[in-house]
Amino acid sequence: MEMDFERCYRAVDSRDQRFDGWFYTGVTSTGIYCRPSCPAITPKRQNVRFFPSAAAAQGAGLRACRRCRPDAAPGSPHWDIRADVVGRAMRLIADGVVDRAGVPGLASRLGYTERHLHRMLSAEMGAGPLALARAQRAQTARILIETTDLGMAEIAFAAGFGSVRQFNDTLREVYASAPSDLRTARGRQQAATGAGTITLRLAYRPPLHAQALLDFLAVRALPGVDEVRDGTYRRGLRLPHGTGEVALTPADGHVAATLRLTDLRDLAPAVARCRRLLDLDADPTAIDATLAADPALARAVATEPGVRLPRAVDGFEMAVRAVVGQQVSVTAAQKTLTRLLTHQVDHEVDEADGDRTPGQSHDQPGGAAGPLRGFLSAEELLSLPDSLFGMPSARRETLRGLARVVVDGALDLAPGVDREEAVRRLLALPGIGPWTANYLAMRALGDPDILLSTDLAVRRGAAALGLPDTQKTLDGYAERWRPWRSYATIRLWRAA
């Protein structure tokens, strides 16, 4: 959204929550900044400034409003659409790259100098990479303060601060409160959910068609990795500093998230990956308006508003799922993937205790379901015996070739990667064609404008809606759905 004063002020005056995360409202007379939807009295025009990011508002000396919690607003959908350097940088910062590798690491990942990267981010976001990461650290620290019993020193380092003093100074500046004052009765009550457990709300812009998300994920769930039960999606996570498990339950205005992490430094990247998985930073109003302009999709949009694009928490996992799923049904792909995963779990447990009955859960007696784990890593896939794959040798070698380039660093499937370059490298691998590369661009890399016109289910969905159902004619027809053809793909799958 362009920072046009009149447009922004109208959004604030109407308390339109669709604009939360697009921009932030600074009120100079009170020294605070808010979401556009803040329920407080609309400030006078002469006392208002608008900022493109929470970090920019903080840099102007404003503190976060305690009423509307602007630092917890949905992220800007702008970064999902944009594939340029600023968009990629914002996704990497959200994934914690600055906390782990510093600004030099971020600049190296993007292929720019630190100075040029700072200049680009400051021009568009009103703040450089350090300030943007600092704003994220403050939000992470607040979550830990309010939802755990950890000591303040532990929280400071878990949130990514270099010292307790820096932690204290930042929170006083951002929230106008000492860290101890943020540990409210509500926070202590939440902390009682269990040791090592963090509960929080993931905001989104309504509407959200939660059932469409859960339906999509349930069909593709893998035993021991993820599951959908009683309206909640649970899955295991591989994170930069360890492992974790998350339970995500859609609710009115937010998704309730319960995280169990082996290392609390992984909170910010875990949250970022959950938001990305459920596409919570999307702008459903803009997407649905474009798709509903087509009479063939209008009824589907009206009946099911807010259908999102299910994405991924792990790019390599999605790549393996895509390759295994080539030219086979979803059910057949699940059987193959389950066999690979079961072998890896059995192998790990046999190394640990050597006396377990094959097929029995190590975590609970009698084979009962235990904790969920992350998907196979590239290194683990390369260690699996050939006999386990149960697929044509060419496809098995495609999986191994994919794993090798990921291990070697020749292929990056992280959220901040250059999408076009990643697709080119995927297409250069034997056994990976346009369908697989584009499927990964859509789900692993988050490209919102991919139409899988060669996909049989997509063509069946098009035929069901009275649309052209050959690749060439459908490609031409779909130009009217830009830049949201990935969302049209999801709707065509549902129509099938």
Image (spheres, rainbow, N blue to C red):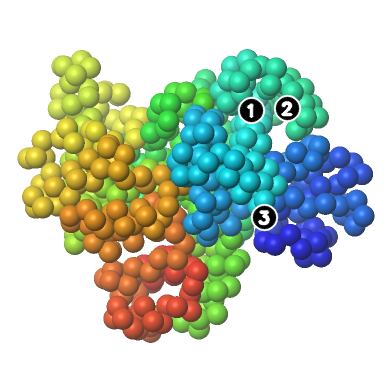
Q: Amino acid at mark 3?
A: Trp
Q: Secondary structure at mark 1?
A: helix
Q: Position of residue 91 (x, y in %)?
A: 52, 46
Compute the Cα span from label 2 to label 3. Answer: 23 Å
- Residue occupying the point 45% across, 78% down: 479
- Estimate the spatial distance between the alpha carbons at disc 1 and disc 3, rounded to whole Å: 23 Å
| Amino acid tagged 2 | Leu
Check disc 2 and report the residue beneath it.
171
Q: Which mark is residue 22?
A: 3
Q: Position of residue 78 (x, y in %)?
A: 58, 57
Relative side of 32 to 154, left or right: right
For disc 1, the marked residue is 141
Q: Residues within 10 Å of mark 2 (few under 14, many from 20)?
A: many
Which numbered disc flags the more N-terminal residue, 2 or 1? 1
**Residue 131 quadrant:** top right
Mark 1 residue crowding within 10 angstroms, few (<14) / some (14–19) / many (20+)? many
